[in-house]
Amino acid sequence: MSGAARERISKGLLFAAGLPLLLFLLIPLATLLGYFSPGEISRQFDEPETSQALLLSVKTSLLSTLIVLLAGTPVAYLISRRRSRGVRLLSVLIDLPTILPPAVAGLTLLLAFGRMGFIGRWFDKLGIEIAFTATAVVLAQIFVSAPYYIKSAAIGMSSVSAEMEQSAALDGATFFQRFRYIVLPLSARSILTGAALCWARALGEFGATILFAGNNPGRTQTMPLAIYIGFERNMEQALTLSLILLALSFSILLAVHALINRNSLPPE
Amino acid sequence: MRKFVLLAFGTLLVLALGSGCGGAAKKSGESDQDTPAARESRTLTVFAAASLTDAFKELGKKFEAAHPGVTINFNFGASNQLRAQLEQGASADVFASANKKEIDAALGSKLAESADVRLFAWNRLVVLYPKANPAHLGTLQDLAKPKLKLIVADKAVPVGKYTLEMLDKAAADPALGAEFKSAVLANIVSREENVKAVVAKVALGEADAGIAYVSDLSGKDGEKLGRITIADALNLMAEYPLTVLAKSAQKDLAGQFVDFVLSPEGKAVLRAQGFLTEPAGK
């Protein structure tokens, strides 16, 4: 048997081995697509709950992503530059929310920021309510999605060589100039990728939200919550929102992949 | 790589088109329950309304003790959620709902026979508040206090629907009126997906008040909660029907469980958990 033929057979076998999982992952999504009907979608948009949930989801997830970008970038830089044991432990801890069951995240947020919580009670004294408000929705989203951004941005920043920064420093560049003109542009791709993943995760956040922010149509009921409640009451609404979420998440992932594969940006 | 992606998309498309048809579930073969070994260890699956959690766990223990080898698996959730799960093919032997509506829907979907449906418990609504009573609640009228944080169940859930019906009655009552209803609705900070979530969040002290069932005060959160009784004229009588499910492979055992729930011993357990076992007061 020729080498090429053997190669082809091996590849075929590899594909056959991967097919069951591939089908398993794709079939449920395909089933959902089977329910696609433009008429039903436009009819659902006449229901205030559907459009409210969509609007709230888009608003809160964009706000969460913005906050994560602003507050997470310094954290990512810190992790990318310091190699001490403490920082390494910190980066493990930051990853925790990504594998923590969302219900646990919601419970811890409620216990910390609820009005009986050890932080929340001080806010309560100031008259600031957190639990069961849109603020809680955003906090829940930040909690579960920030690690995705920090992780991605830190990987990008750590590939910017320290020597490059040092030589710029020798030439008199201030810390902020170095950060602005060297670190940020060179890790732009990782930063954008991280931000997109963070946004997609925030958009899909459910478990922490329903526990911590509650389910209040128009105020805290995001799309995933409306889908969960809709499954029991209004299956058409649940399906419509599921299709929209699927389309949004898929677009975000496509954008991420396009970013990763783009060659015009400087290599990392 | 591109070919692979195309292939994946092609598969997706074919599946999408194919998902409309087909899907008829295969009839599972006759179970081998006639062998002695299978009879010795049998599992009964009971879907029950979340408000029944404590009562049914207790009933389940007693039933298991009386029927060696039988294990009862409970799935507690909002009645509407359970009914939706059953309609989507979840397999269970018994379904106990917190309202007739979900049982009627189950009958409509041929999940059960109307001859099998039996009412076994009744329940009333009550206002709960954390023991510390942060909003200084004393009467039902206080639910209209401005900026009160009230947690109720979503209207998809039986208790949530009863809550709205209670508010409608209150709106028609000259002593409370329509302003009372709208003020209470404005105070709602969350509509939970089942009654136990309402009770848990109020017990944590995160809300000033919640509306749940009288029986919920008999649960383990009861000691953390205070109550305001809702007058019979405004209150509703929640009815709990249960039924053996048509697809149950062990209708005899399922029927025995139903009979046990309705037996004097079963009723005593229900009463101890705060349920009424007769439609009193109506």
Image (tube, coloured by chain):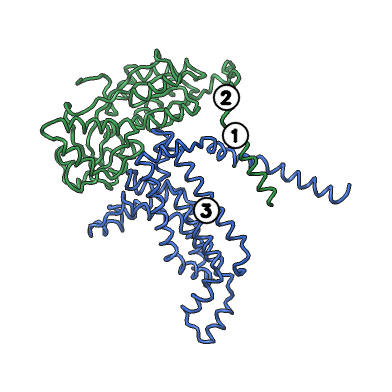
Chain colours: A blue, B green
Residue A204, above or below A122: above
Residue A203, above or below B200: below
Residue B261 can be seen in this image: yes
Q: Foreground residue, A195 or B67?
A: A195
Label ID, residue B24 = 2
Residue B246, above or below A29: above
From the top left corner, tell me how far across and down residue B236 is, in percent: 23, 27
Closer to the observer: label 3 or label 2?
3
* Residue at mark 3 to residue at mark 2: CA–CA distance: 35 Å
- Quadrant location of the C terminus of chain B? top left
In the shown orientation, is residue A41 left or right of residue A112? Answer: right
From the top left corner, tell me how far across and down residue B32 is, in percent: 59, 19
For image coordinates 81% across by 50% down, the residue present is: A7
Question: Residue B244 sits in which quadrant?
Answer: top left
Which element carries disc 3, helix, strand or loop?
helix
Work out whether disc 3 and disc 2 sit on a shared chain.
Answer: no
* Residue at mark 3 to residue at mark 1: CA–CA distance: 25 Å
In the shown orientation, is residue A266 left or right of residue B147? Answer: right
Q: Residue furthest right?
A: A1
Residue to which mark 3 is pinned: A252
Which element carries disc 1, helix, strand or loop?
helix
From the top left corner, tell me how far across and down residue A49 is, in percent: 35, 41
Q: Foreground residue, A171 or A253?
A: A253
Residue to which mark 1 is pinned: B17
